[in-house]
Amino acid sequence: MKTFLAFLLALAPLGAEVTVIKNATIMTESGKGTIKGSVLVRDGKIAEVGESVMIPPGATVIDASGQWVIPGIIDCHSHIAVDGNVNEGSVSVSSMVNIKDVINPDDIAIYRALAGGVTTANILHGSANSIGGQTIVLKMRWGKDAEGLIFEGATPGIKFALGENPKRAGNPQPAGRGPAGPLRYPATRMGVEDTIREAFNEAKQYKAEWDAYDAAVKAGQHPIPPRKDLKLEPLKEVLEGKRFVHAHCYRADEILMLIRIADDYGFKIKTFQHVLEGYKVADEIAAHGAGASTFSDWWGYKMEAIDAIPYNAALMAKKGIVVSLNSDDAELMRRLNTEAAKAMKYGGISREDALAMVTINPAKQLAIDNRVGSIEPGKDADLVIYDQDPLSNFSKVQKVLIDGNKYFDRDQEVSGRPRKEAEKQKLIEMERQQRIPTGGRRGQ
Amino acid sequence: MKNLVFAAIVFSACAAAQTQPASIAIRGVKIVTVSGPVIANGAVVLRDGLIEAVGENVQPPAGAEIIDGSGLTVYPGLIDALSTWGIPQPGGRGGRGGTAPAEPRANGPEDRPRTTSWIKAAEEIQANDRRIESARNAGFTTAVVFPTQGIFGGQGSVVNLAGAKSEDMVLVPSVGQYIAMNAGRGFGGGFPSSLMGVIAYIRQIYLDADHYRQVKAAYDRDPRGMKRLEYDRALEGVIESKRILLPAQREAEMDRMARFAAELRQPAILYGMREGYRAAELLKRANLPVLVSLRWPEKPRDADPDEVDTMRTLENREKSPSTPEVLKQAGVQFAFYSDGLDAPRDLQRAVKKAIENGLSREDAVRALTLSPAEIYGIADRLGSVEKGKIANLVVTRGEIFDDSTRVEMVFIDGVKHTPSPEPAGRGGAATGNRAENRGDQR
């Protein structure tokens, strides 16, 4: 009985948990712009944002005087928290594999991303295949199990890849620089196009079989269902608009090529990823309605990246494309705030629009902007507190909230280190004691 | 030829035992029945390979061979819940989890990569595997052996660890399918080359099996005018399997595999359990039986002294052996498995380590007798000292799993085996050679 009461008591504050962050400079990334004031969080959602917010009794108050609050950062292109190989590199169409099956909640990169202000990330299959695996959007809820990391309700995606990466396995590579073993089709950009078209030819036929089956069932017949094919199932979903295509690409010609395929088969590209020559075909990308998720200033690291310019993000944005900046990298992921700041230097983007490239814009690209990406009432309380201007490379993340719960606290992290280190040393010492030879064991 | 000679030796070794009288009685002995209370001083009568009577007031029948049990304890014969004893291992001892023999490069699930789901361990058993004798000397009378190569390794069989030929040994030919997340060689190898590829493949196999069954049923109802179904041995093997064994060492893997088993709608057993000590609640919720590896994680002997292990690695080495007790407390059904150990001393030490980490001796015995029998649904014939069950017993001087305890005799199908004073080498050292010999003969 006693424990039951204690249980109830423990639950009670959860029922109406209220947190107020006050005295902060808040970059809302909404129509409100940047304001000085408070954010009220209730039950994991943002309840109120404004210059003066009533603090309800019993609320947890975080005084952020002199500090800044921004919406949780969203990385539209990441490969963290994956168990095993991020590429199913054996086949050119690996749509049957799903990142969702191999989420690794133990990956320390999740915590490090949090410490860099990231609260949501689009976890993609690698770029080895023309059509890669299925993707998933995660929240960086460090400590939760795999299921607990998944961004509930976010539309799943699939990775496509164009250009050098998917054709590499079709060409002989210097020893140790690529796949060993038999070469794989395709070996050219033409082959990449053909591979994607062939896959959609199959998918259309597959869809027709299932549509016929569904119609027959509706008509009261009892046919044997067609074989469920895990490779074609996600492509069928793409054709039905139920799954987003995130396409890795570099060159203008291949971007146009994929738009033509999409038009021919009647589906949409949700985002072009990397898209370093996007500035050359920005009108076409905008007309297709695709987003562009690019690097701030990486270029020249391979032939297809030779025409990249750091003005790419700004130029595409000015043509009306929803542009985000991504990391593609566990380390860069921790510094996306300064990646955004670079758009101010290269292209003269405003502060708010620059930060939008790592908050509300990627949220739009992933169609989760009804939930995250800005500080507005009704949205998830995914908030980052910086000690100073988040667009400065001197700023440090102080606290990170996801769904109103604190997942990172710099003070706690730093003050907790000696205790963790002591725990570790204790284990090491215990093990050393146990390993002192008890007689017959030599040569340790 | 070599095999023949070896078989002959094994046969003659058993011959003495086979001329024994119709029944054997061990009296004045302590009996750990496992299924019921311990009998401090009683008798066990064995006849025709079965336990004929057990109890305090059991009288040996006339003509029975009498064994004086004073100072001895009778336990049910130990069962290794997941074993490769008797199955030829490629590359010898280190062959566990190795790649399957060369096969054409798979281009997708349709090529059924690294799949031998139709193979039954019963058909692969080699009675002359030296590890069998070694395990017997440690008190093991039975093992659930599996072909473990590839992704769908094959079907496990319950075998007794004595017999001149495999037919004598097999108790149950098929108890489940061994599945490993064997991702293969990566780039340049065939499909699948990643963990997610393996999972996708397994998922496709079960979808295909469902479809296969449906089409087959329709064809059997009325084949006229219907294209006949192409025979698929990979699917036949999967359909034939009563349950699946899925690997799970890390907590995240236990979570993943428990969900996967539920998705596949297959009765499942999880094996591994290195991080079982932190996953009791998860495993209880999953309501799946688990097999705990007796190979506790250890710092490698040749570890780089400058390398600092992660906290998780250190924790696992410290707490992994407490897994059995944690599972016991949580009410998770578990059994032990040898996981490559076969030398009696190693097996005894490994079990003792679990006892030192909180598991009671009774529970340790249970995890090697009745629990594995229950998990595989064979507790009606094995796993305890009960009337009518198969006469598989181990008789020790001293309490089982103690350092100083000796296995005095082992009964398998009622036949007495007396361990040689010192086990023949370190078990499977020579097995690899034998496996190779076998390969030559094919």
Image (cartoon, rainbow, N blue to C red):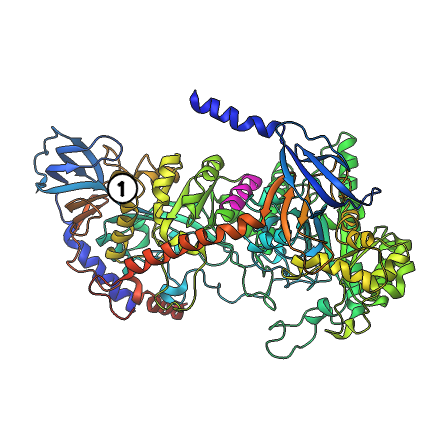
Residue B126 is situated, as x and y percent measured from the top left of the image, at 33, 58
Total numbered labels: 1
Examine the image and state in which quarter residue B340 appears. Answer: bottom left
Residue B52, placed above or below residue A71? above
> Which stretch did the figure color magenta?
B254-265
The residue closer to the viewer here, A429 or B387, is A429
Kindly report the secondary structure that dominates the magenta region of the rendered protein. Answer: helix
Is residue B120 visible in the rendered image? The answer is: yes
Image point (41%, 64%), residue name: B95
Q: The numbered mark 1 sits on a residue in which chain?
A: B
Is residue B231 visible in the rendered image? The answer is: no
Left or right of residue B349: residue A265:
right
**Callout 1 amino acid:** Val
Left or right of residue B17: residue A230:
right
Residue A374 is situated, as x and y percent measured from the top left of the image, at 76, 44
Instruction: Residue lying at the far top in this picture: please name it.
Output: A1
Image point (80%, 59%), residue name: A197
Other residues around mark 1 within 10 Å, as few (<14) / some (14–19) / many (≥20): many
Image point (31%, 38%), residue name: B370
Q: Tell me the residue that label 1 is attached to.
A: B365
Residue B265 is situated, as x and y percent measured from the top left of the image, at 55, 38
The residue closer to the viewer here, B268 or A309, is A309
- Asked whether B255 falls inside the magenta stretch, the response is yes
Examine the image and state in which quarter residue A264 appears. Answer: bottom right
Residue A320 is situated, as x and y percent measured from the top left of the image, at 90, 54
Quadrant of image for the C terminus of chain B: bottom left
The residue closer to the viewer here, A355 or A300, is A355
